[in-house]
Structures are given as C-alpha cells and as structure tokens.
Amino acid sequence: MYYAKTYEAREELLHLLDGLEEDKLHYKKSPELWSVSENVEHLYLIENKIVNGLKKAIQAKATVEEKDLNLEKMLANRTYKVQAPEDIVPSGHPYTKAELLQMLEQSRANLNDFIQDVDDTSLQSYGFNHRWIGDLSAQQWVQLIGFHERRHIDQIKESIQ
C-alpha cells in the first residue's frame, strides 16, 4: 500500500509520545530548535494543509504528471534545512500531551477520510506543487506526509536525548 509508511511513522510518533513525560514536551536544547510540542503541532498543521489542498486539487481536477521521485530519501536528508512557511510554523502554545494526541488523531482522521473518498485514478492524476520538489500527485503527497513525519520524529528524538 502506498500509504503504509505514512501510517508506520504515525505509530512510531505515538509510541514516542506515549513514553514521554509532560515536562519534556516543551523543552528546547536551544532557542532555534523546536520542542516536542512544536514539532507535533507542525505535523498536525501540515497534515491538515496537505489534505485540504488535495481535496481542492481533486475537486478542481488539477492534473499533474507523477514523476519517479525517492521522497523517502529526499526527506530523510536533514543536512538540508527547510524553513517552514508561516502558516505551518508552530504557535508556541504550551499544549498538553492529551491535546497533542487529540490534534494528531484529528489530522489523521482527516487523511483517512480523504483516502477513503478518493479513487486510485485521482490519486495518481491530480495533485499540486510542492514549493521545492515540484508537482506531486495526491498519492505522493500522502507518502510525503509520512516521510516528513519521520524527519520530525528524528528531530524529536534528538531533542529529548
């Protein structure tokens, strides 16, 4: 399944959060790094933004030519730092673990609803532009969610060590 790694990443994130004490959620090793809470808020924001963008792209029948990309490798490369767009930068709000888990549950429910409602042809034919990768199909965007999440799981692990 094209989205298996996306779901595996979420399971790893939930397991990581489950074993984390509340007082570690807002700790930062340095001011320019995000806390666990900020990483999770960012993941929530971006997952919803992507899914909402995909719904619009499919409704508008925005065709893209699916390219053969190794998204997993591209997103795993953390030597290349990417500045998040303003609308998906975390607010810094001191969320509780329960609130963060609820946010992740909501964004994943949004993704699940999308996957259930869309057909395979639309997944491969429609999509939109990623600001530094280029056009991605809906299927590639769903995969990107998981690879992006794995990137932030690595950041979270570093921040709590």
Image (cartoon, grey):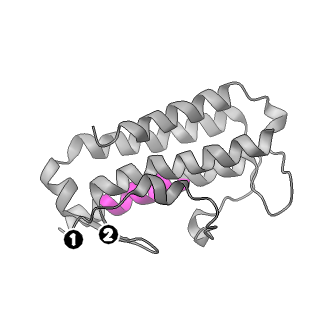
State the residue lying farthest toward the left: 121
What is the x, y in percent for residue 82? 60, 68
Q: Reading the chain from its start, which is encountered first: label 2 or label 1?
A: 1
Residue in view at x 51 percent, y 30 percent: 11
> Disc 1 marks which residue?
62
Q: Quadrant of the N terminus?
A: top left
Residue at image mark 2: 128
Q: Is residue 123 placed above or below 60 in the rendered structure?
A: above
Point out residue 47 in the picture as x, y percentages from the top left corner: 47, 52
Q: Are marks 2 and 1 in contact (CB under 8 Å)?
A: yes
Query: Secondary structure under badge 1?
Result: loop
Q: CA distance from mark 2 to mark 1?
A: 7 Å
**Dot 2 amino acid type:** Phe
Write the residue at 21% across / 64% down: 126
Q: Secondary structure at mark 2?
A: strand
Q: Going by the image, does 4 lie left or right of 116? A: right
In the image, residue 30 lies at what x, y percent? 86, 57
Residue at position x 80%, y 64% in the image: 32
Q: Nearer the viewer, residue 104 or 145?
A: 145
| Range shown magenta | 45-54
Residue count near mark 2 (Cα–Cα under 10 Å), binned few <14, some 14–19, many ≥20: many
Q: For this view, does 96 lie left or right of residue 67?
A: right
